[in-house]
Amino acid sequence: MAGQAVAAPGHEGGVGDNLEIAVFLCAPSAARCHKRYATAKQRRELGVFLKSVPEVTEVRFVSRAAAYAAFRREFAGRKKTLAGVRAKDLPESFRVRVSGVADRARVLAAAESRPGVWWVVDQADGRFKTQPSWNEDFSVLLCTGTSFTKGCKRGRGSANDAAATAKEKKAIVAAIERIPGLESYVFEDQQTAYRNFVETYADDESLILATRMSDLPMRYRLWVRPKGNPGSWGHRLAGMPGVSQVDNLGCLAEGVRFWLEYGLENHRSWTRECELR
C-alpha cells in the first residue's frame, strides 16, 4: 500500500521500540508449537497478510540471527545469561507499526490466529510497565492476610496466615539496615501502594477496576550498591518471619525484556530466579 515501508523476509532488521507490535513465529522451545519452527510458507504468508492489514504502516522481519546478535549486545555483561541462550532458542518475528487510529487489539487478534504464530505482543501495552516507577533495586514484600507463600503460612506461631506483625517488621528493618552497600530504604503501606498502582496504570481502567487495595502488599523499597545479585543477604531476608518474598527489580526487568523483546518463553524460570522466597 502507498507510503508503507516493508522489510522483506531475510532482511536483517533489528529489534524495535516500545511502539511496535511483535509477532513471534513458532520455534521448538515455544509452547503450542509442537517443537517445530514455523515453515517458510507460513512465514511468507504471514508477511503478506500483515502487509494487507489497512492500519499497518510498516512491517519488518527480524531473523533469528539478527535477534540473537541484538540479544548478545544487550546482555553482553551477563555471562550466565548468554551461556543459557542459544541462537536456535530465539524465534523469528515480524515487527509491526500501525497508524495512530488503529484498533491495536484487533490487529493483535488477527495476527495471533495465523498459522505458524506462537504469540503476539503489543509492546505499547500499559500492562507491561514496570510498577511502580520508583527505580528501587529490591522490594521486600511483607505478608498480608491473603499471602500464599510458605513463609507467611507457617513457622510464625499465632501470626500464621496473618499480616506481618509490628515485632516482625522491627526485626526486618534491623536486617535491612545491616545490608552491605545499603544506600536507603522506604516503607510503603497498602494505601500508598494502591495510589502508585493507579497512577502507573491510569490508562488501563479494566486493570484498575479488577485490583483492590487489599491485593497489594506492604513493602520496603531498597536502594543498594552495587546492583545485581543480592547474594546471601537476600535469602536470609526472604526467610524471615513476616516476609513474603524479596524481588530483585533489575532482574525482573531483564526477564520482561526476555519475554517481550525476544520471545523467550523461559522468562518464567528467569522470574523465579528474581523472586526469593
Image (tube, grey):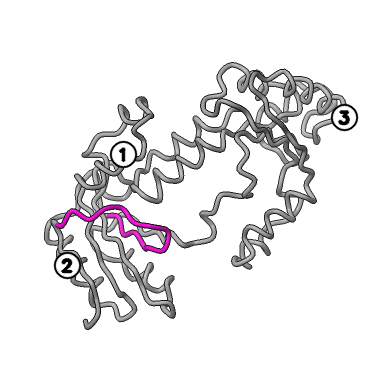
Q: Are marks 2 and 3 in contact (CB under 8 Å)?
A: no
Name the secondary structure under disc 2: helix
Residue that carries the numbered disc 2 in the rendered image = 45
Residue 77 at x, y percent in the picture: 37, 29
Report the amino acid beneath label 3: Ala
Report the amino acid beneath label 2: Glu
- Measure the alpha-carbon separation of dots 2 and 1: 31 Å
Residue 135 at x, y percent in the picture: 60, 43
Start-end of magenta stretch: 11-24
Quadrant of residue 82 within the rendered picture: top left
Residue that carries the numbered disc 1 in the rendered image = 73
239 in the magenta segment? no
State which quarter of the image contains the C terminus.
Answer: top right
Residue 89 at x, y percent in the picture: 26, 39
Q: Magenta region, mostly helix, strand or loop?
A: loop
Count up the numbered dots.
3
Judged from this view, the residue extending furthest toward the right is 166
Q: Is 9 on the left-hand or right-hand side of 24?
A: left
Q: Which numbered dot is residue 166?
A: 3
The residue closer to the viewer here, 235 or 37, is 235
Name the secondary structure under disc 1: helix
Q: Which numbered dot is residue 200?
A: none
The residue closer to the viewer here, 249 or 120, is 249
17 in the magenta segment? yes
State which quarter of the image contains the N terminus.
Answer: bottom left
